[in-house]
Amino acid sequence: MNVDASVHSDRNQVGVGCIVQDFTGCVIACTTNILRGCYEPLTAESLAIRKGLDFVDQLGLQIKVIETYSSTIAEFCSKGVGLFGHEIGIVLQEIKNRIGSNMACSFIPRECNRAAHFLANSVFHRDPFILGNDALPFTAMRRENNGVLKMAELPEKMSTLKHIGETLTEQERDAFLRDAYHNFDGDVDFELFLRVYLKLQALATERRGSGAKNSSAFLKSPTSALLHTISESEKASYVSHINNYLGEDEFLKKYIPIDPVTNDLFEIAKDGVLICKLINVAVPGTIDERAINTKKMLNPWERNENHTLCLNSAKAIGCTVVNIGTQDFIEGRRHLVLGVISQIIKIQLLADLNLKKTPQLVELVDDSNDMEELMSLPPEKILLRWMNFQLKKAGYMKTVTNFSSDVKDAEAYAHLLNVLAPEHSNPSTLKVKNPLERAKLVLEHADRMGCKRYLTPKDIVEGSPNLNLAFVAHIFQHRNGLSTQTKQISFLEMLPDDTQISREERAFRFWLNSMGNSSYIDNVFEDLRNGWILLETLDKVSPGIVNWKIASKPPIKMPFRKVENCNQVVKIGKQLKFSLVNIAGNDIVQGNKKLILAYLWQLMRCNMLQLLKNLRFHSHGKEIIDADILEWANSKVRKSGSQSRMDSFKDKSLSNGIFFLELLSVVHPRSVNWSLVTKGSSDEEKKMNATYIISIARKLGCSIFLLPEDIIEVNQKMILTLTASIMYWTLIHTLDDRSPCAFSDSETGSLLDTSSNSTMDDTASESSIDDNSS
């Protein structure tokens, strides 16, 4: 098994390439994968080997030799020689245990590792894939030619590959390869074969267009098809939404209205402005538009800044953008761009589905216990509950449980609109037998109500979940049919109004969702109660620390299994030196809000310090604690000649934002336009500065989840995350200037024990229970 890792610092990701060969050197299988985080090379290579071993186990193969470019890892696995920090030590020990006496781990030079290295890098330009032993054209082609394969033979031999052979003629393949490769008589090794195949596949995909339904049998993505199609109906609906909400925008009006039939949407999105503006429509004030680059002609760096701002802001409003980078927007990858747009529009349409925005929703519940349950539901579930509440009024006996199969016949829609707008009803709607005809009448009813369609009759009958959800959400926004007099308002008055808890829950929820876990979290107090997401996050923060053998994966029916998961969560927290006085696993299972927030804050802080430690690890720096972050920020600002400083992360003078604007200006000159900065004297001026700070930081590449209010009120936890994120970005780019996250084994091998001896620094790490009481 030959493995390699490639660290991509600006995406905060590591690519993994793994090739499995038999004793004759023939390729049996290969795979690519993505790991989240910018690890130092030794850790990245270790995690890649672990992924490779998982892949081999998945295939049911037994291997004899692991080949790695890291002599340090090879020496440790062979002789047990080397001193390592806690996290990497655990991973290496796990690898050594899995290798046992039946396998060897050997060092190979870079020239022998090129194919795996190519695979590791390829994952940043296309989806991860698996090449299994059911489709091995390279091995088969070489065997047919007595172990030799020439470039000149590929156009003919690739006719047997379904996707390429059906789409491109042999002459087209020959012409393309002759244009791309000058040495047509050269031998083809596995790396070159992969390069040729992926180029031809891209050409075939482009030729076939969006009508391609299936990917080739050759490359199989572990998560999704390699060839992605998009829904033309969804695209048309989202284009209509954008035309409606952004048509009067001063910058975008020269591009709008966008033609939904063309691919203009993806071309316009390439400069990043449109999606930034769309985010502000969904959640007003998220992006300070003064931070968006809106020149007529943007250079590549300015476009990249806009995309970085867009992606970090999308994460900050709850979008899942794991494994999406700025290059995906620049290249106009349609399924990824449309996926982000879809999430943003969904957030906008569901924005009113909560008691704060729509207190009339109390009409859906009978008592305070039901109220607590309603508050914990995600917006989609509240929308379904509202829909069924209205359908019950209409005498509709079925319960709608989804926005797909349950609404395909359009009967539920007919009853819903009859209740909400009886003055526009058509008696024929419920009499027609054909679902498509009924769907047409339903949409005509919606038109008379003044509701935007978002979908066609065909979309209803085919059960398009995204468009049906958008349709119902818009109906709710336009006419929800709830009482304007909330007779049950006493329920709301009885519920605690803890703004601080709500803001922290939001920040931690979005942070957890940005980690690429297996499930999306709608409410941390409900969705973490089985412990699984916390275990996944802990394994990302400190790889190898979770004992998965004793963990139970959802769905978990037995309550004691949830307690076991949460007990391990608490145990690991203590290993990581969290302050967990009087916290037990059952507190998480029971949804204890303050204790869960206390744990999440320490987990988030641990992740930040771990990322910083990985970077300082390269430069022989000491262990990072909160005081180091404070001193780093003060030192940077002081060297600029400014008199500003912060005494702690709860220094009230930070509320005007001037210190952070000076810090951002120091780490990235010209990032701050000082003509736009206010003195921060009034609350309004403070908010303008705070919004500008957050947008500039995100534009640079900082992944932060705080709100302007957190800066204005000097929330010490969020102030620490902001400072640490700026420090992390600065150190990343300092290392990139030297060598882009690439260090030799001689460097990493000389770094000895980095095990943690830090303690919780009380300047910023008090638990959520008493954090803001002072």
Image (tube, rainbow, N blue to C red):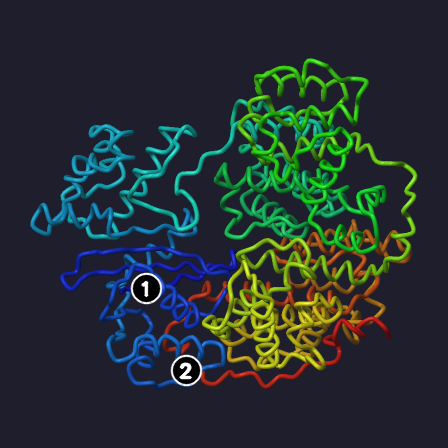
Counting from the top left corner in percent of width and height, residue 152 is at: 15, 39
Q: Which one is in front in this view, the residue at disc 1 or the one at disc 2?
A: 1
Q: Amino acid at mark 2?
A: Ser
Please say if 562 is above or below 361.
Answer: below
Q: Secondary structure at mark 2?
A: loop
Residue at far left of view: 146
Please say if 727 is above or below 263.
Answer: below
Count of numbered circles in the view: 2
Q: Which residue is mark 1?
A: 57
Left or right: 328 as drawn, with respect to 579: left
Please say if 277 is above or below 611.
Answer: above
Q: Quadrant of residue 245?
A: top right
Q: Earlier in the sequence, mark 1 or mark 2?
A: 1
Report the quarter where the C terminus lies. bottom right
- Identified at 37% across, 57% down, the residue is 120
Counting from the top left corner in percent of width and height, residue 420 is at: 79, 27
* Neighbourhood count class around disc 1 (C-alpha, 10 Å): few under 14, some 14–19, many 20 upward: few
Q: Which residue is mark 2?
A: 750
Q: Secondary structure at mark 1?
A: helix
- Identified at 69% across, 33% down, the residue is 397
Is residue 730 at least partly visible in the picture? no
Marks 1 and 2, how far apart at CA = 33 Å
Q: Nearer the viewer, residue 309 or 549?
A: 549
Q: Which mark is residue 411?
A: none
Left or right: 596 as drawn, with respect to 222: right
Q: Nearer the viewer, residue 676 or 398?
A: 398
- Identified at 41% across, 46% down, the residue is 126
Q: Amino acid at mark 1?
A: Asp
